Amino acid sequence: MKKQTGLITMDALIRERLPDLVKPVPSKKTLSRWFRAAGIGYYKANMRCTHGGGVHYFSVPGVERFFRRVDTRRSRTAKAPTTRKATPRR
């Protein structure tokens, strides 16, 4: 995957970048919640639109870091051995 810097719209992100990072690609609403919770920066084309509307641009490096971090967490937990909780002796 070629590293890209800059900004990208949610539609372009879903169409071009996310199929390489995650399968299946989540919905726009889910992605928006994830990005907001992770603190990924977004920018509006028209900053005067304060109540939604307008196109949001997301930071490409921020999105890629987010999915790499999620992927490494998932792979670490998948490799972790399962341990049984010790039962107390009476």
Image (spheres, grey):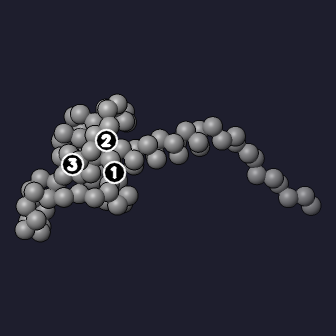
- Above or below 71: residue 62: below
Q: What's the residue type where badge 2 is placed?
A: Pro
User: Residue drawn at (81%, 53%), measured in percent from left and top?
Assistant: 86
Picture coordinates of residue 4 (x, y %)?
28, 40
**Is residue 89 placed above or below 72 in the rendered structure?**
below
Residues at circles 2 and 1 in contact by the CB criterion of under 8 Å? no
Mark 3 or 1, nearer chain start: 3
Q: Decide: marks 3, 1 in contact (CB < 8 A)?
A: no
For the residue labelled by badge 2, is the local secondary structure a helix, a strand or a loop? Answer: loop
Apparent side of residue 57 relative to residue 25 in the rendered image (left or right): left
Return the x and y of residue 24 as percentages of the image width and height. 35, 34
- Quickly name the residue at label 2: 26
Amino acid bearing label 3: Leu
> Mark 1 belongs to which amino acid?
Gly
Residue 7 - label: 3
Q: Residues within 10 Å of mark 1 (few under 14, many from 20)?
A: some
- The disc, 2 or 1, on the residue closer to the chain's N-terminal end is 2
Horizontally, residue 19 falls left or right of residue 44, namely right
Q: Which one is closest to the eye, mark 2 or mark 1?
A: 1
Residue 3: % across, % down:
32, 37
Residue designated by label 1: 62
Please rate how many residues cluster around mark 3, counting C-alpha atoms within 10 Å: few if below 14, some from 14 to 19, many from 20: some
Q: Residue furthest right?
A: 90
Q: For the residues marked 3 and 2, what is the alpha-carbon distance in whole angstroms?
A: 19 Å
Sooner in the amino-acid sequence: mark 3 or mark 2? 3
Q: Residue at x 59, y 42 (%)?
A: 76
Quarter of the image with the C terminus in it: bottom right
Q: Is residue 81 left or right of residue 68?
A: right
Residue drawn where x is 18% and y is 52% of the image: 57
Give residue 45's mark.
Answer: none
SS at mark 3? strand
